[in-house]
Amino acid sequence: MASMPQNPLLALNPTMTCGSQVAEVITGRRKEKKAIVLDLFEKVYLTKPEKLYYAYPNQVSLGQLQRVSLAMALAAKPQLLLVDEPFSSLDATNAYLLSSLFRDLSRQQKITFLMITHDLKVTETLADCWIWMENGAILLEGSGSIIQMQDLPIEIGQVVRSASLVNDHKPKLNPGTEALLSLSNVGYRYERRKRLSIRKKEPSRAISGINLTIYRHHVLGLVGQSGSGKSTLAKIIGGLIIDFEGQLKRHFVENRPYFKHVQYIMQDPASSLPPLRSVGDIILDTIAAYFTEIGKRDRLLLLQKVLKDVGLSDDYRSKFRYQLSGGEKQRIILARALVVRPEILVLDESLSALDRYMQFEILHLLEDLMNNYKLSIVLVSHDLDLVENFCQTLIYLEEGRIRFVGKSNDPAFQTLKESKNILH
């Protein structure tokens, strides 16, 4: 038995290269082990396996890391493979390829898959049989289509109906024309050392020649397949990467520190919340760091207000990370960012791990927050259904370069989707 974890960022060792971590599972000489690892990388549809072999986890996209974890699981030659939410961080094309890979492994190598997922499309196309759980108990089980079943329990019917709600959602916003941030010819490359070499380095370019402008009260969508440079660009906009090429120009009215204007929300809310701090302490820490001039009473009032703004009661102040659902963690992360009163929120694949019903709730919440806080949002996602319907402007990235800027209904974008075989 082997397992493929939901979050490879937490499962993989950040101090070891991807190749060496997979090679640990394999016995034999170093060259033989490397050859096996490269073959496994190719089998899980990872391009440029030699380059990936010497890359560290922080230099690889989450979608690619997920398949590195799958290669590590396959290296043990298991009969039973537990895969936990394997498609939540993949774009549609790579999700289709991975599901095809699962199907082939099941048939050719006789591997049994136990798959945990909230994606009904995956269940419909891939699962031979399914079990629906609710509140820790089995509510329903069967085979065939869940969506086409008659007389579903209320809890299941609500989720099944919500699967199509995101596609129909259009934000009610009046986008502004005031520029807040502009990027000119921005690029970034990771430096990689050759094995057993001190001086010689091999740069790996993540993005290059990026030009874009973020406007007030606007939703900008960044889309592209795994490894396209979406997250790198999001981190530059969010202020987490500062050694980039090109120019980032601010147009903010107030001269405040950058992180008071822009807040970056990580892809995985669980790993960005301290496990030993309560929700109240986490947000109060942020208030204390950014508003040193206000007293304790005002800080508590600000905490109470921001929790209410994200749809949570004051009772959540005493809760810890392990007591929160995925949607509740996402709201806490939003509260921590909003308490700074930023003008731009960068959401890096923040909705990918949520089911469709929860995505629909968070989108409604984001719409209300944009109107109340006069926010602009940069939404990074591989989910075209979500981005096309929620974002006012869409940027498609491929191999670190912008291939399209415009509306999702632009014929040029539809042609691009068809040419690149981007699947819904």
Image: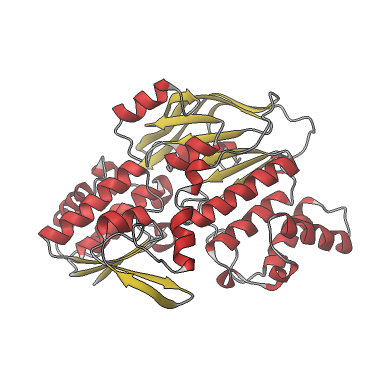
Q: How many marks?
A: 0
Quarter of the picture containing the N terminus is bottom left
The residue lying at 44 percent from left, 65 percent from top is 156
Query: Please, is residue 134 above or below residue 363 in the view?
Result: below
Q: Position of residue 276 (x, y in %)?
A: 61, 72
Query: Please, is residue 236 above or below residue 166 in the view?
Result: above
Residue at the outermost front position: 151
Q: How is the image coloured?
A: secondary structure
Nearer-the-camera pick, 53 or 398: 398
Q: Position of residue 193 (x, y in %)?
A: 36, 42
Q: Position of residue 336 (x, y in %)?
A: 68, 55
Nearer-the-camera pick, 29 or 230: 230
Residue at the outermost bottom position: 137
Q: Is residue 104 in sight in this rendering? A: yes
Quarter of the picture containing the C terminus is top left
Left or right for 262, reference 301: left
Nearer-the-camera pick, 151 or 136: 151
Q: Is residue 400 in sight in this rendering? A: no
Query: Please, is residue 20 above or below residue 3 in the view?
Result: above
